[in-house]
Image: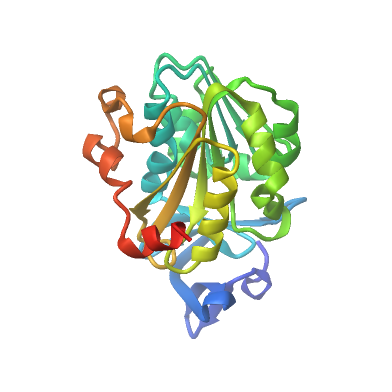
Amino acid sequence: MADDDLLLGYEKDENELWLWDDLPELHMEVGYRINRLLHFERSAYQEISVAETSAFGRMLVLDGVPQITEKDGYIYNEMISHIGLLTHPNPQYVAMIGGGDCGPAREAARYPDIKRIDVVEIDPRVTDVCQRLFNRSRAAALDPRITIFHEDGARWIQKQRERIDVLLIDRSDPFGPAAVLYSRAFYQHVYSSLSYDGIAVFQSGSPFFDMKGLKTTYHRLQSLFPIVRTYVTSIPSFPGGIWSFTVASKRHDPLAANTDKLPAGTRYMNKAIARSAFALPEYIQDALRT
């Protein structure tokens, strides 16, 4: 294990170890007290660590930035997954870019009629670490319908043509290798990869701290898809708490989704939330209209 001072984002304060998520564009930092560091390595793509935090249990950290936690990760995974899966009347082929922890794949596997679930994660070490240190990830990897491709998602999507029924874009922040996942060209490739009535769901950031990013996602998708809707949820470990996702659909409106299809066993998503998540605060509605 490397010395603590070599890890991005980690700092010692007297006898305590903290992870600081530096958000310079917001003029703030968010700190997480670390009980112990469970894993650290530098892969070919990034620095990977898993920390046991006081507030959120185990946390996956990439290049010093928290990604998902043991305690509230189910909220993110359920919210990025079930809206699109409920909206499509009969999804057979589901794919996701990112999500190497297999959380969204685990949610898709709750639907028995889905025949194929592809996970595209650029870094094989993320998958390996998550399967070893997050129990739910190991369980998801055992489903025979799930295939993991360790490829660049922006390149993988260009090879897909009118096949995917529901595509989940579990992308990280819009800088570094993930920046291409926010480009106009990428959105066009997403559109081309979907079946005639396909649906794509994008992680679209904090509407409070990054309204510009949300607006850009929303309007670029509007230029391609006839139906585009943003919805929100609350994720305690994320900066600001409130988080957005944007669904783009070729034919089916998520406001008319069949919520009776929602499988048992979810911890956050229910029929009411599948509707109410689209009830946006006025400041978000105003911003998306401009």
Q: Residue furthest front?
A: 290
Q: Residue pushed farthest bottom? A: 14
Residue 193 horizontal side relative to residue 267, left or right: right
Q: Nearer the viewer, residue 13 or 178?
A: 178
Q: Residue pushed farthest left? A: 272
* Residue 105 x %, y %: 49, 31
Q: Quadrant of the N terminus?
A: bottom right
User: In terms of depth relative to the viewer, which is nearer, 271 or 195?
Assistant: 195
Tell me: residue 149, above or below residue 196.
Answer: below
Please give left or right for residue 193 compared with residue 133 in the image.
Answer: right
> Residue 46: which quarter of the image?
bottom right
Residue 106: image x %, image y %?
45, 31
Horizontal side, residue 44 vs residue 221: left or right:
right
Relative to 179, say whether 153 is above or below.
above
- Residue in front for this viewpoint, 145 or 161: 161
Residue at position x 37%, y 56% in the image = 235
- Tell me the residue at 46%/74% (across/down): 31
Of 47 and 181, the residue lying toward us: 181
Question: Residue at coordinates 47% horizontally, 81% vertically from top-left?
Answer: 15
Identify which residue is drawn at 31% across, 46% down: 277
**Residue 22 visible to an observer of this rendering:** yes
Q: Residue 265's x, y, as percent? A: 28, 31
Colour scheme of the rendered structure: rainbow
82 shown above or below 142: below
